[in-house]
Amino acid sequence: MSIRVLVADDQDLVRTGLRMILDVQPDIDVIGEAADGRQAVELARELHPDVCLFDIRMPKLNGIEAVNLLAGPDVTDPMAIVVITTFDLDSYVHEALRAGARGFLLKDAGPDLLAQSIRAAASGDALIAPSITARLLTKFAQLPHRKAPSQPLETLTTREEQVLLTVARGRTNAEIADELHISLSTVKTHLASLMGKLGARNRVEMAMWAYETGRIHGESHRPKG
């Protein structure tokens, strides 16, 4: 069955381009388009797409607010949402992920990565553009009055640390299994354990925790012991 996608962007040309890229994929079907955040939320609730592809900056309701309404912590059945943007404002992207987005890309990511992100979101994975992840930690670490990351409820095992790093680099479950030479069921077991220990709602929050605690870049932010 095709993955049903809702695209939201305030620029007609961008929406047309995204539809053209996705419609040539044999397993992806764009079922609707929205020109602003409010319309995006209304259409998402009406059409129940498998994945929403939202721009961050939209009129009437911005992408972050739209994500929060459809996938936030108070949503009983959160939707799979991928944020796509032209803006290198990582604080905005961080807010979108905190609001419940399952992944994010830049609009110059290319057709292959765009399609991969849709498939990953539909299957419960998250794909974070590698070009953004390193920048995200560097810039976010420089923000003033940044709240210290919470400590895990239990110490992470060596294998959980390995899985966490692969998640933070945007790997899907299948890629994690291949990279660490473990089964898919074992990957899912480790992910469930990590979410419990970190108090994370999804793998994107796990990735953000890895960035904030210095597990990806910046030895000066790396926890000791």
Image (spheres, grey):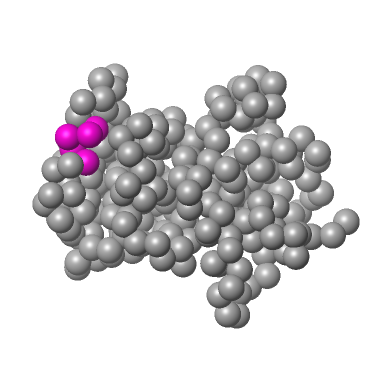
Q: Is residue 192 visible?
A: no
Q: Is residue 44 or residue 102 the one in the foreground? A: 102
Instruction: Give left or right: position of 86 versus 33.
Output: right
Q: Main secondary structure of the magenta part?
A: helix
Task: Say how many tags the image has.
Answer: 0
**Splitting the image into 4 quarters, where does residue 171 fall?**
top right
**Image point (84%, 60%), residue name:** 224
**Image point (72%, 38%), residue name:** 162
User: Is 15 above or below relative to 62?
Assistant: above
Q: Is residue 5 visible?
A: yes
Q: Is residue 170 or residue 61 the one in the foreground? A: 170
Q: Position of residue 45 (x, y in %)?
A: 24, 47
Q: Position of residue 98 (x, y in %)?
A: 49, 59
Instruction: Give left or right: position of 121 versus 154.
Output: left
Q: Position of residue 106 (x, y in %)?
A: 36, 50
Which region of the structure is painted magenta?
A: 18-22
Q: Position of residue 50 (x, y in %)?
A: 32, 35
In the rendered image, which quarter contains the C terminus? bottom right
In the rendered image, which quarter contains the N terminus? top left
Q: Which residue is the extreme one toward the left?
A: 12
Instruction: Give left or right: position of 57 versus 163.
Output: left
**Image point (53%, 32%), residue name:** 172
Q: Which residue is the extreme one toward the right?
A: 225
**Image point (19%, 68%), residue name:** 60
